[in-house]
Image: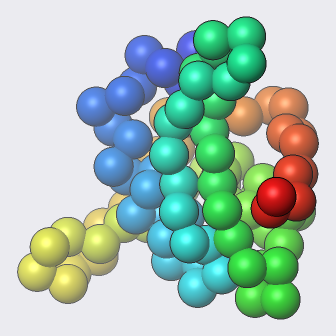
Amino acid sequence: MGKNSLLRKRLKYLVSHISQDDGVIKLQAVLDDELKEVMDISFVDTMTNFNQIHHLLNSDTLTFTYSNGETGKIENMFHFSAMGIKKEKE
């Protein structure tokens, strides 16, 4: 998460945006083995792919859905320059 950790209160926008991809199952911030906060995204690889998710994370605009079903847009304040690591489910 790096500097994105400072944006914790706005994470709901990113979660809503990424969740629009039907292949995404879960998105959460967790601690890795070095106790650094990282983004853990679980997805079905027959419905989406690693590159698509990276593209969504770095979109210029986040599209989100309000609880009443209406949608909104906000400038993406998150920045994920590193591609990340794809891990197979154990």
Vertical comparison of 14 with 26: above or below: above
Vertical comparison of 90 with 4: above or below: below
Taking depth in this image into account, of 49 and 28 the one nearest to the observer is 28
Give the quarter of the figure containing the C terminus.
bottom right
Residue drawn at point x = 20 percent, y = 70 percent = 66
Vertical comparison of 5 with 57: above or below: above
Vertical comparison of 49 with 81: above or below: below
Picture quadrant where residue 51 is located: bottom right
Residue drawn at point x = 56 percent, y = 72 percent = 25
| Residue 82 pos. (x, y %) | 85, 32
Q: How many circles with numbers are drawn on the protein?
A: 0
Q: Residue furthest front?
A: 90
Picture quadrant where residue 50 is located: bottom right
Give the quarter of the figure containing the N terminus.
top right
Taking depth in this image into account, of 26 and 74 the one nearest to the observer is 26
| Residue 49 pos. (x, y %) | 84, 73
| Residue 78 pos. (x, y %) | 56, 34
Residue 79 visible in rendering: no
